[in-house]
Amino acid sequence: MNAPLPAAALEQQCVNAVRFLAVDAVQKANSGHPGLPLGAAPMAYTLWTRLMKFDPAQPHWFDRDRFVLSAGHGSALLYSLLHLTGYDLTMEQLQQFRQWKSKTPGHPERGVTPGVEVTTGPLGQGFANGVGMAMAEAHLAARFNKQGHTLIDHYTYALVSDGDLMEGVASEAASLAGHLKLGKLIYLYDDNNVTLSAGTDITFTEDRQARFDAYGWHTQMVDDGNDLAAIEKALRAARDETTRPSLILVRTHLGFGSPNKQDSFEAHGSPLGADEVKLTKRQLGWPEDQQFYVPDDVRARFAEVAKRGAQSAADWQQRYDAYKKQFPDLGIELDQLMKVDGGHLPAGWDVDVPTFDADPKGIATRVASGKVMNAIAARLPALVGGSADLDPSTYTALKNTGDFEPSGSDGLDQQGSNGGAGWSYAGRNLHFGVREHAMGAILNGIAAHGGLLPFGATFLIFSDYMRPSIRLAALMKLQVAYVFTHDSIALGEDGETHQPIEQLASLRAIPGLTVIRPADANETAAAWRVAVESRHGPVALALTRQAVPTLDRHQFAPADGLLRGAYVLADAANGKPDLILIASGSEVHLIVEAQQALLQQNVQARIVSMPSWELFDQQSQDYRDSVLPPEIVARLAVEMGSPQGWHKYVGTAGDVLGIDRYGASAPAEVLLREYGYTVENVCARAKALLRASALR
Ligand SMILES: Cc1ncc(C[n+]2csc(CCOP(=O)(O)OP(=O)(O)O)c2C)c(N)n1
């Protein structure tokens, strides 16, 4: 046994172990990014071993500090840390980096690797996810911590890179985080002046520190990214700063230690090469002929960290038990919240879901949605969210549940506040400002944090602005609800810039996202049920601006048919349909009228409400055939949007009344007429279909 190393030398060994596990993994895979781990290992090591609170044996411990590797291309760094600190990530897994079905995929993936909080890789997203996590922490702390019982008390850390800071989503999120004074958000910026293809000199020369100062962040600079003491000092100062998020600009070298590649973009995204790996190891005093080498004293040092983490988690459990004794009701609520994203909804959460009376005039589905949300909010304390500056239009304010704003802002202009319960982090109404993309990514962060069911709202057209985050929500299987209103050209005078055409089709193209376009108020209530009960990913509701009739459910099939994605709203009068009319949302009312008009012309039509393709596709073949019998090939789909995809349901013999050009600025009635959304045109298209099928 060798004599123990002096502390500083041991720490250097630990940093090198982190570095070279990553470098060896990349080299073995012959694919990956060695540059970031070599440069950023010291700051990551310092954070993970000297400050962060986590228990590798319980990756989901609720009060753990959250860590986001926003620069997800540096995944090998994270895997090294997870392995060394004792998460369930074996050396074999490190050796399987980037291989089929390994737990070490190319970029970090939530749900694949224990300890990975969010999927990162698309730059900027992780930055904004962290803001969501810090908001969730601040919110839950405000709701549950009591004098002498600080139960929710963790930091959100991230490692962010040049690419992260260049992306717009990070700017949006940084601006909001500064406004919200999220003091427990601490980011280490790997300030290495090099990106994938170039030095930052040719693209990124603003004063980053001044920029973040202007956002209201607390900023510090560490000149030497290898100086563990300086990094630790800055991290501690960041923690002492309680009313501003922190950015620590750490000057590092991409590919640190590589004699021929350091500071060059060649170190960014390709293996160094076997010879260069050896040279780098030699340069940093690491055994050059060993791969995946971890000295015993390094293992022992990391084991201490794990032990400390286990102790923190055990202490927390004791404090939680004491809390539950003293505050039994809050304890039950928190117990339930901590499990809510695992599918544990409070018993009776839905008893107040309203039923809407039949009404030919009806209400807009956005209005119905607002009523449903407000009805369920009291029994669903996990529900939080807001809009990107569109509350008066999206009807998503949760009345009298407070506004999520820093307390002490009382002197400010409180227009737009939802009133009733004041401004504090305990408020359940989140105000995102006009920042759709950050809203999407923040919702992901809140959902990934756990304990809350977040929703976000904007016009359907602007879902495009948040699409990258929606995709990641689906990829991560996060439970997020999107409320997208103004869902068709029927929004009218705002014109083609605001009228969604391809948005439904493009959202439906996202695997794992459930898109629901309810036809009336009662279908909207059922749609919210799907959103709240969803376990496998996000749900997007597409809602009307204009009033739509509330169908008489004595005359038509019950609205809970929505739960199966599509259902026969009313069959042909004689039970033997000549054709099937299918529609979603507001167009359902058009086919309801068309069915009657066709009957006058001796055409027997079945009408099908099809609010959700994804839900329908999950049904049994028998059920699907019962709604769309294969022998009835004359089928007309009616939807005010791109026809793309509808042929899956109408078949090659069917037709789609869709829109494959942009909208226009005019009153809704004019647009509906001009675009052919009239009873006459639906009937004409239906009869043309029948004629064509007779000729077959
Ligand atoms: C949204 C997005 N655009 C592009 C990429 C491809 N990409 C991966 S890393 C990178 C830039 C790397 O520069 P930096 O963030 O400074 O990381 P470093 O080179 O320091 O590792 C790019 C463009 C990406 N991952 N995400």
Image (cartoon, helix red, strand yellow):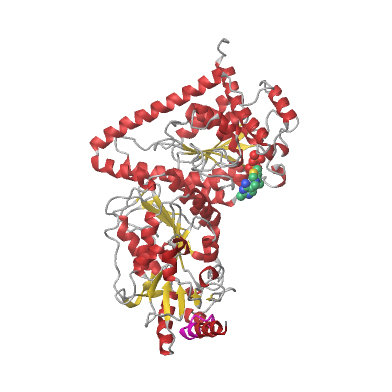
Residue at 70%, 38% (x, y): give it: 270
Residue 642 sits in which quadrant? Answer: bottom right
* Vertical comparison of 280 with 591: above or below: above
Residue 644 sits in which quadrant? Answer: bottom right
Depth check: give the residue in front, 421 or 688.
Answer: 688
Residue at 65%, 30% (x, y): give it: 24
Rendered-image quadrant of the N terminus: top right
* Residue 39 on image: x %, y %: 64, 32
* Residue 640 on image: x %, y %: 51, 73
Rendered-image quadrant of the C terminus: bottom right
* Vertical comparison of 530 with 206: above or below: below
Depth check: give the residue in front, 149 or 88.
Answer: 88
Residue 253 appears in the picture as rendered: no
Residue 675 appears in the picture as rendered: yes
* Vertical comparison of 510 with 230: above or below: below
* Residue 211 on image: x %, y %: 58, 45
Ligand 1 is found in which quarter of the picture?
Answer: top right
Please report the bounds of the magenta region as a residue range: 674-683
Taking 235 as reference, is 386 left or right?
left
Residue at 55%, 21% (x, y): give it: 298
